[in-house]
Image (spheres, coloured by chain):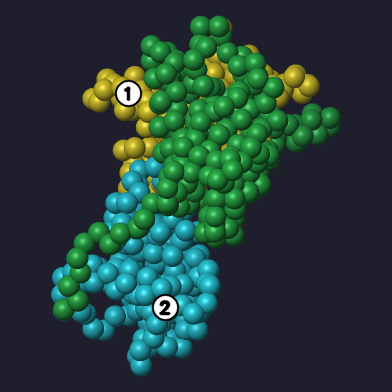
Chain colours: A yellow, B green, C cyan
Amino acid sequence: MADEALFQFLHSELIQYIYKSGANGETENGKNITKLEAMGFRVGQGLIERFTKETPRFKDELDVMKFICKDFWTCLFKKQIDNLRTNHQGIYVLQDNSFRLLSQLSAGKQYLEHAPKYLAFTCGLVRGGLSDLGLKSVVTAEVAGMPACKFQVMIQKV
Amino acid sequence: MSRQSNRTTDNKKMNSELFTLTYGALVTQLCKDYENDEEVNKQLDKMGYNIGVRLIEDFLARSSVGRCQDFRETADVIAKVAFKMYLGVTPSVTNWSPAGDEFSLVLESNPLVDFVELPDNHNVLIYSNLLCGVLRGALEMVQMAVDVRFAQDTLRGDNVTEIRMKFIKRIEENLPYHIRFF
Amino acid sequence: MTVHNLYIFDRNGACLHYSEWNRKKQAGISKQEEFKLMYGMLFSIRSFVSKMSPLDMREGFQCFQTSRYKLHFYETPTGLKFIMNTDLSVPNARETLHQIYSTLYVDYIVKNPLCSLGDPLQSDLFSARLDTFIKNLPYFNPRAA
């Protein structure tokens, strides 16, 4: 059993490492985000692989998304997603009003420019989890004021 | 429904897996970025140190542990309180040096290496080296300079995982400037 | 009953945070001078107290009082120092200072990777939570003193 604080500190170090080893600048920032996202993806896959073996198949796409919002989120961040919306055409918006990895950074606009790097790994976790449940997707995050944030999931039809 | 009950039992495990898997992803990334294992070991130690200097504050805030009187007490607190709190395991404290300035933490199982197998071309890699950095950083913040290294590692075929800790010195606090009282 | 002001120092003597609520008189020197003076005094009194102690003790210096105010001191094993001045009616503020450390400093500074340890505390979230915390203390009363 590993403690939550330990994961938070590790997550911060990961970001710091990726940003230190990569160069600065706009395009580099994009590369760093991609790297973090890719790491999250592998971890998300691993998590689902180990924990959904015995769970029955999901009814449909929406059922999978509900699983991500409730069970998956609670395991990882000790709370559920506060709001799930969909256009019923493969786009889902998951809103967390107090996202665990932002809640200690700021309650507003301070440090807002740093928010994307604290979300990239989690975007990867979601995409990795979904991919292991058979859904190919693109996951992005958006923050207007911390600690709230929105994850947008676009399911790619095969 | 059966699905519900299955999932709740999985929750706790999944949370600890998050840490283990993230750590694995980090080591993989480092192995990609650096040419030799020694550099990876160094980097892991450095990152561990950065974690340690913060983790100690979390530890002191959450446990009611105060300043330790001696190195033996420190050893016990690390093994019985800190390891238990953060990794859910309690290593045994053994192999004290006659002078009482060196001991080993012996772990029957190391949560960091669940599901890990070292590939053959990484025989210098100390996979869990982050732990050494964490311990070094945390102890430095409570005024103890300590040398920490892996003496045995199950990943390298040893029966147990052993972390060797050697007390170097107490870091004295000094007044950083001259004060003029009026 | 009232709280006058609060200082937080790191183990190297840098003042990480200062805020005041009901302070009616300033020291008449620059804030930087004041912080040095405060830290120097604490450093000396702390060593004095333990050197002169006729008994073994775990906790050393805790507070002093004058005819008008009381200074409360709490130090963590990592050398962070929390100092609060209150009026004389506040019996013991060590628990309060410990809480500022364990629930505010640790949560909003230590767990905020954007705050480098040892730098003056910049987090607005920390300042806001601290202000609320102090104002909610049973002995905080803005009109008193």
Placement of C114 over or under A139, stated as above or below: below
Give the residue at mark 2: C52
Report the front residue among C112 and A52: C112
Q: Amino acid at mark 1?
A: Ser
Q: Residue at x 41, y 25 (%)?
A: B42
Q: Residue furthest front?
A: B98
Which quarter of the picture shows residue B177?
A: bottom left
Q: How far across and down, in percent of the image, does residue B134 sit?
A: 49, 38
Q: As displayed, is residue C82 above or below residue B57?
A: below
At 84% from the left and 30% from the top, the residue drawn is B2
Name the secondary structure under disc 2.
helix
Q: Quick check: do tags 2 and 1 share a chain?
A: no
Residue C22 image-quadrant placement:
bottom left
Quadrant including the N terminus of chain C: bottom left
Whether residue C70 is visible, yes or no, is: yes
Q: Is residue A25 above or below residue C39?
A: above
**Mark 2, other Cα within 10 Å: few <14 / some 14–19 / many ≥20:** few
Instruction: State the residue in front, B103 or A87.
Output: B103
Tag 2–tag 1 contact (CB < 8 Å):
no
Residue C13: quarter of image: bottom left
Residue at 60% across, 36% down: B104
Q: Say which of B57 and A135 sits in front.
A: B57
Residue drawn 59% across the image and 43% down it: B98
Image disc number at residue A21 = 1
From the viewer's side, name the closer residue of B114 and B98: B98
Chain under callout 1 = A
Q: Chain of mark 2?
A: C
